[in-house]
Image: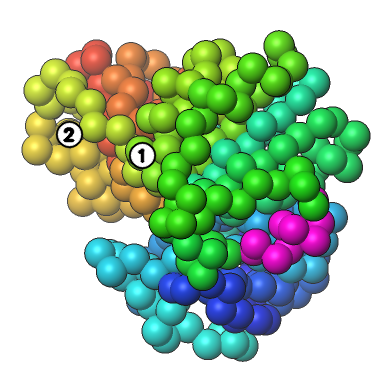
């Protein structure tokens, strides 16, 4: 974890604040476009936010948070109680939404989904790769960073307040793109569904706010053998691996608990995990908050 101090809190749109987080004891860890950090809040919650500042700035991170009236306590705390000068802990940056090489990019942002795409747009143009951004929101007042986007990228950005202009047909954006162009999309589920209908799966990269509802086989009990500590933990059908480890006194850091952030990643040494995450666990890894086991036993590097 990295120690930071809340250096600035700015209202950047209706119900959206931007936080500038300064390293408390020197430079912060480097990051690349698409990365996010876990922020450990003083109300005992940990939440994930995309980095949306300048990748070359090692002194500060910038994140933006929309207030969610259905919040489980993260956005509410930040909007109502967090103050400038407060010390916090944040994780090292993690990136499950990396910018891959391509001859051209189309970025599609919906609301607060602009945060990972803003540094991607900046990186693409700095590399002289053609890129454009379509940014949708209910109204201009609710859309953060519109002035920054206009001043930085000019007519490469199309800003669409849907209450006034309606939702554009994303399918009309594809024909003019290079055949090898990649489309990056971050926004609400309805926007991601429209992007999936409009672009081939091989060219679309998406980041979701919440996991897709999917059906899995009924939960069954399994064992988790902890290789380094020599213990075996029973994981009942009505508990997650994350919960069982915590109850056994071997807690694992976790953020979203929905399989979308990657903070609870574990190394699997033996056995077959059943992956239920939304980000695609790499080989030999699993996410303890949602994933389970196809085999009767997993051996974990714990």
In the picture, measured across the screen, residue 38 lies left or right of residue 5, that is left
From the top left corner, tell me how far across and down residue 273 is, in percent: 33, 20
Q: Nearer the viewer, residue 231 or 41?
A: 41
Residue at (90% x, 34% y) in the render: 128
From the top left corner, tell me how far across and down residue 285 is, in percent: 46, 26
10 Å crowding of disc 1: few (<14), some (14-19), many (20+): some
Mark 1 and mark 2 in contact? Answer it, CB < 8 Å.
no
The answer to if 277 sits in the magenta stretch is: no
From the top left corner, tell me how far across and down residue 243 is, in percent: 23, 46
From the top left corner, tell me how far across and down residue 136 is, in percent: 52, 49
In the picture, measured across the screen, residue 190 lies left or right of residue 174, that is left
Tell me the quarter of the picture where residue 242 sits.
Answer: top left
Q: Quadrant of the C terminus?
A: top left
Residue 12 sits above or below residue 198 on the image: below
Residue 169 sits above or below residue 137 on the image: above
Q: CA distance from mark 1 to mark 2?
A: 36 Å
The numbered mark at residue 189 is 1
Residue at (28% x, 69% y) in the render: 69
Q: Nearer the viewer, mark 1 or mark 2?
A: 1
In the picture, measured across the screen, residue 157 lies left or right of residue 76, that is right
Question: Is residue 31 visible in the rendered structure shown here?
Answer: no
Look at the numbered disc 1 and give the secondary structure of its residue.
helix
Q: Quadrant of the N terminus?
A: bottom right
Question: Is residue 46 visible in the rendered structure shown here?
Answer: yes
Tell me the quarter of the picture where residue 194 sits.
Answer: top left
Dominant secondary structure (helix, strand or loop) of the stretch shown in magenta: helix
The numbered mark at residue 234 is 2
Among numbered discs 1 and 2, the one appearing first in the sequence: 1
Residue at (41% x, 62% y) in the render: 46
Q: Provide the residue span drawn in magenta.
A: 145-153
Tell me the quarter of the picture where residue 280 sits.
Answer: top left
Residue 5 sits above or below residue 191 on the image: below
């Amino acid at each position: 974890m990295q120690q930071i101090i809340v250096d600035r809190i700015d209202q950047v749109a209706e119900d959206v604040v931007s936080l500038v987080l300064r390293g408390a004891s020197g430079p912060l860890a480097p990051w690349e476009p698409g990365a996010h950090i876990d922020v450990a809040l003083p109300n005992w919650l940990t939440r994930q936010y995309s980095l949306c500042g300048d990748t070359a700035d090692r002194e500060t991170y910038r994140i933006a948070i929309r207030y969610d009236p259905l919040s489980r306590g993260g956005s509410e705390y930040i909007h109502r109680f967090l103050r400038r000068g407060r010390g916090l802990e944040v994780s090292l940056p993690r990136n499950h939404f990396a910018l891959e090489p391509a001859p051209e990019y189309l970025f599609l942002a919906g609301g607060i989904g602009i945060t990972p795409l803003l540094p991607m747009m900046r990186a693409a143009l700095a590399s002289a790769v053609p890129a454009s951004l379509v940014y949708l929101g209910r109204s201009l007042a609710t859309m953060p960073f519109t002035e920054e986007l206009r001043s930085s990228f000019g007519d490469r950005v199309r800003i669409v307040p849907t209450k006034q202009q309606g939702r554009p047909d994303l399918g009309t954006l594809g024909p003019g793109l290079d055949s090898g162009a990649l489309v990056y999309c971050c926004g609400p589920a309805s926007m991601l569904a429209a992007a999936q209908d409009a672009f081939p799966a091989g060219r679309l990269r998406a980041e979701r706010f919440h996991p897709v509802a999917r059906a899995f086989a009924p939960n069954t009990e399994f064992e988790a053998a902890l290789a380094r500590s020599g213990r075996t933990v029973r994981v009942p059908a009505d508990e997650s691996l994350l919960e069982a480890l915590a109850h056994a006194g071997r807690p694992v850091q976790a953020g979203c608990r929905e399989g979308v952030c990657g903070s609870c990643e574990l190394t699997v040494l033996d056995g077959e995990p059943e992956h239920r995450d939304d980000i695609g666990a790499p080989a030999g890894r699993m996410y303890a908050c949602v994933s389970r086991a196809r085999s009767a036993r997993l051996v974990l590097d714990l």
